[in-house]
Structures are given as structure tokens and as C-alpha cells.
Amino acid sequence: MEQSPTRRSAWKEVAQDLVWYTVVMSNKKILCLSVISTVLVLCIACLVLIRLYPYSSNFPALPRITHTQSGADGDPVNLIFVGTKAQILRSFHQAGWLIPDPITPHTSEKIALASLAHRSYPTAPVSPLYLFGRVQDLAFEKPTNDVQNRGHLRLWQTGMLIGGHPVWIGAASYDQGIEFSGTTHLPTHHIAPAVDLERNAVGADLARTGLVKKEAYAACTPPIFYARNGGGDYYESDGDVLVINYTTALIPLQQPVGIIDGLKHSVFSFYDTLLTSLLLALAVGVLFLLLVGRELWLALSWLVKKFGPRGKLSGSSR
């Protein structure tokens, strides 16, 4: 049965509109993909540049990472102190940081019960990590109302002197929950991946005491985009150490090119925010859904316009 001229004209118009829509949407998709591809290439190039840039290493004689008793990698070194033990103890005490209890059967039971009940245990023990073949010489923690969450750090005296003053190195991280270790399979604290934030928090707390003469950041290792500690916890770091000086001794530090340093810190600031901000993650997800929803709405609107009741009525009237 031969179709009427009116119906053939209507189908021809629909076909033309479909071709037009396909071309327009195809061009939009190509443009969108080009923009996305360009951004991805720039991001990858930026990350490669930050990672492979030949940073000048400060304090090359000092270790870069702690170790567990079994020899596995522990938390990264991210603090250096220049001063006496008395100066360090006084500043942490004034900043509100506490000295952890030793690990004993009694304190182990106490921290286990507090963890189960999500109670505070302000001086909960800190597990041992090793440098120079020994456990930490000093440890401090900043408690919260739940023993599962706390700031903490470990310090070792290096035996080095700067201007006649002893040098200490430390590893700071934030405990965020209890988990079974990926290596020992025993209960242990889970550290938050953005270890730089706890390093910065230590520096800010001590600076407020007025007892620190100077603080400065210095490149120590290449940036770390992904690593795991002895408990199997993932972490990332910009590779800088925070040098906290209680003395007037001058500490010569080599700094990278300003543009590279600024780019590195900008990337890792965003990285830290992405790892710690639920709001940012939700915003990225909502933006993605809006973009997808917009395209679906355009396609649906066109289909309804052409094939819905009004579209059919308009076609038949012609």
C-alpha cells in the first residue's frame, strides 16, 4: 500500500530532524571529549612532572621511612626537630599533646575496651616503630572523645648536631579507626591517608606555643602518590619534611624551583581535600549526574516533541 504524500513528507521531516540532532549531538560529544582529553593529558603531564622532577634532597644521611619490628615499611618520616629533649617535651605539653602509656596487658585491655565502646582514652599506648635499630625515643598523642581517632607522632634522636643542638626525626599521622593489620592480621589503628595534614597540624599546634623559633618545609623525598605502611594502610605525601627549630641555629635548606614547588603543593592540597572532604566528593558526583541528566533530558524532549501526541497531531494537520 502506497503512503500518502503527506505521510511521506512527515517521515522525511522526522528523518531530517533526526540527522540534524545526531550531527549536533555528535559535534557536542566530540567537543566535550576533546576538552576532557586535553584536561586529562595536562593533568597526567603535571603529575609526571611533579613525580620525576629532580628534587634536591635535604638531610640525605637521615632515613626516609620507619619500619615495623618485622622490617616492613612503617609510616613516612615527615618531621625534623632541632632542640633538646626538654624543649620538645615542654612545647608539646603546652600545645596539649600527651605522652602515651607503655604497652602492658593492662593498657592493652583498656584500649580494647575503650575502642569497642568508642570511649576516650587520652593516653592510649602507641605501637612501636623502628629507626636506627630501636623503637621511638619519644611519642605524643592528641586525643579525641573516641580512642579510635587521635593525632600521634613518634620521635627518634639521630645523634646529629646542627649548631651544637641535637637533631630529632619524627613520623606523624592521624589514627582513624581500628582495623585488622594487613600484615600481622592483629587489631591496629588505621591511619588516615593524608599524612601531610597531621604533619601540618603538629607544626601549627607547636607554633602557637611561642616556643618554636622557626618552622620551614624542605624537600626530603620525591612526592608519594601511593604507598602502604606496615599495617597495609594506604597513604600519600608531597615528600616534604617540616623542620621545627627551637634554636637560633641556621639550617641550610635547598628548595626546588618556585613554580614546581607551588605546583606540587597545589596538587597535593587538592589531593588531601579530595581524600578528606565528603562534601567535595558529593559535589563532583552531583556535577556528573547533572551533565548526564542534561543530555538525557535533551534527547527525551526531542523524542516527546516528535513522537508524542502533539507531534502526531501537528504532523497530521500538515
Image (cartoon, helix red, strand yellow):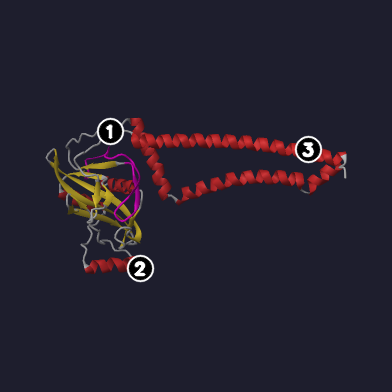
Query: Disc 1 designates what residue?
Result: 255
Residue at image point 25% right, 33% down: 254
Q: Quadrant of the N terminus?
A: top right
* Label 1: element kind: loop
**Which x, y percent locates residue 298?**
66, 43
Identity, as a three-letter code, of the amino acid under mark 2: Ala
**Which x, y percent locates residue 118?**
36, 65
| In the displayed structure image, the side of residue 306 where residue 134 appears, left or right | left
Dot 3 and dot 2 residues touching (CB under 8 Å): no
| In the displayed structure image, the side of residue 117 where residue 107 appears, left or right | left
Identity, as a three-letter code, of the amino acid under mark 1: Gln
For residue 217: magenta? yes
Pick whichever of labels 1 and 2 is earlier in the sequence: 2
Residue at image point 87% right, 42% down: 2
Query: Disc 3 designates what residue?
Result: 13
Q: Is residue 167 visible?
A: yes
Q: Nearer the viewer, mark 1 or mark 2?
A: 1
Identity, as a three-letter code, of the amino acid under mark 3: Glu
**Which x, y percent locates residue 103?**
22, 63
Magenta stretch in the rendered image:
211-238
Residue at image point 70% right, 35% down: 20
Query: Disc 2 designates what residue?
Result: 117
